[in-house]
Amino acid sequence: MNDLFKLTLKQAAEGLKTKEFSSKELTTSVLDRIKKIDPKIGSFLLVTESIAFKQAEKADKLISENQILSYLTGIPFALKDIIVTKDIKTTAGSKILSDFIPPYSATVYEKLEGQSAVLVGKTNLDEFGMGASTENSAYQVTKNPWDLSCVPGGSSGGSAAAIAADLAIYSIGADTGGSVRQPSSLCGVVGLKPTYGRISRYGLIAMASSLDQIGVITKNAEDAALALKEISGYDSRDSNSVEKEVPDYEKFLKDDLKGLKIGVPKEFLSEGVDIKVKETIKRAFTQLEKIGAKLIDLSLPRLKEAIAVYYLIMPSEVSANMARFDGIRFGKERGEFGPEVKRRIMLGTYALSSGYYDAYYLKAAKVRTLIREEFKSAFEKVDVIAGPTSPVLPFKIGERADDPLQMYLADILTVPVNLAGVPAISIPCGLVDGLPVGLQIIGDHWQEGKILNTAFAYEKNYPFNDKPKL
Amino acid sequence: MRKKISLEDARYVAKLANIPLTESQLEKFTSQVSEVIEFNMSLLEKVNTEKIEPTAHVTGVSNKLRKDETEQRLSSDEALQNAKSKHNGFFKVKAILEPS
């Protein structure tokens, strides 16, 4: 009973249902684990112990009355600190919001509260989600549980490290250019970014509005399917969310891939991708073939411009969204922004300024159309596309911090997905020198079911059972 | 079209964006922004985008309007709870127009 924190979401939900243990016992186990382990990792900016116990008590009452509302009832989770929570401090990892108490909650948190889920804390991130290592947090550095001298990735580095270290049963992140998938890859956990518009972003502090999407970080693909279903759906308060039925993703979880066509773009394994990462991914391809998938060689030549498109469109939208921090209605003065936020505001303001808009922003928006079309025609031939999530293994803390361009290249395999608005998942597929490698599986718009099926079949047949030693 | 960003360009952009920067920060950002723009444009300039429409939205949602009806949202106390300076239920800001 002492090791309840190790459970997956599915296992924990079953234990609560059969009354093997209570939500209070499960929550206590997770909070004790945070107290013991998080001082080494630095996942959490805030641990919400008293809120968690209140929510657990409420969940236990529901369970005792046989009124379990969903798989998430009574289960401890962590929330990226860029999602606003009424009366609970929300900082976005920024000094500018160091004393910000939101007067309302994000839709995703309201949904979780409505299902009597248990919030154990708010997790660390790169300031406003801007970074790929969580080193841009104004508060603390989060360490990779697999090697404490390495970064956990970013920007949802706190959320991913928390799951790798069993500091929550699942967590919620947000992904603008890879911020759920890349840290999941670097921390050896599962990270799913659904289709743009699948989950309401009301109350997600906006970074780049045409790219932002909330996602889930879990211990396996099955848990990702369960959590995704419960937080998806249309919300009139996010006009980009889409009125489309949310399927029961659990139904897609079959353990073979007979007849599934997987596209393998050669650009995903080109130069710039670490040779050991490449070898691990190629082995995963062979394994996918063994369980029934058919591999189809593809070329997506426009992928090589994706990073350039992203680093014009994203900062442009950042510069517009960050204008709301005026130091009047909430937050401190604009001088409190950290260096990366200032850099992106400068970049975006320049790209949008008079005389340059057509050459930079508009040009990038046109090439974005070509990238979308390339994905569209690829999905006429294949069901899913696969490749690495990150071109490199977890890198050392400080190694890239002073070189923005190098840091930006960490996103090279994840940003094309956000530019096209399609869903993708990262799942662990092996270790290299003791560090995890993530396999990225990309689907067409609204085809979360297919990528979850692929991920689930892979992990059933080739389970990733390694855990960091902590 | 592409040109190197000068320190004066950067100063102007910082003013537009209302970002206070020291002289050394300004110098650093000038070279970093230049480097990123140069890198981006070296790739994008090679792509033919004649007759290509720019992407404004990825899933094809068009403008959504709600009924013009009032809804219960934040109270004025809630809206003001994070303001540093307020007066009689209003946000207090520095004067924009000075009396002559």
Image: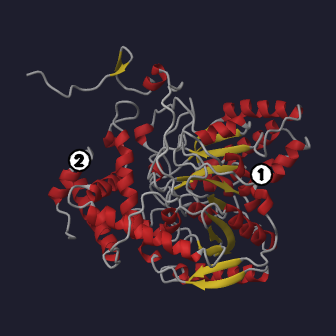
A48 to A467, vertically: above or below: above
Task: Tell me which amino acid carries mark 1.
Answer: Leu
Task: Tell me which amino acid carries mark 2.
Answer: Leu
**Which residue reaches farthest left?**
B100
Circle 1: is it few (<14), some (14-19), or many (20+) Cα within 10 Å? many
Question: Looking at the rendered structure, which numbered label has been put on residue B16?
Answer: 2
A101 to A318, vertically: above or below: above
Which chain is disc 1 placed on?
A: A
Residue in the picture at 66% in, 73% down: A383
**Residue A464: % across, % down:** 75, 69
Label 2: state its secondary structure.
helix
* Residue A288 in the figure: left or right of residue A243: right
**Residue B71: % across, % down:** 53, 26
Measured in 3D between alpha carbons, the distance from the residue under mark 1 to the one under mark 2, in whole angstroms, is: 48 Å
* Residue A399 in the figure: left or right of residue A451: left
Residue in the picture at 79% in, 63% down: A253
Residue A51, image quadrant: top right
**Residue A174: % across, % down:** 55, 52
B54 to B18, vertically: above or below: below
Residue under circle 1? A9
Residue in the picture at 60% in, 39% down: A107
User: Which quarter of the image is occupied by the C terminus of chain A?
Assistant: bottom right
Which chain is disc 2 placed on?
A: B
**Residue A187: % across, % down:** 63, 62
Determine if residue A406 is in view: no
Front position in the image: A407 or A355? A355
Label 1: state its secondary structure.
helix
Question: Looking at the rendered structure, which numbered label has been put on residue A308?
Answer: none
Determine if residue B90 is in view: yes
Circle 2: is it few (<14), some (14-19), or many (20+) Cα within 10 Å? few
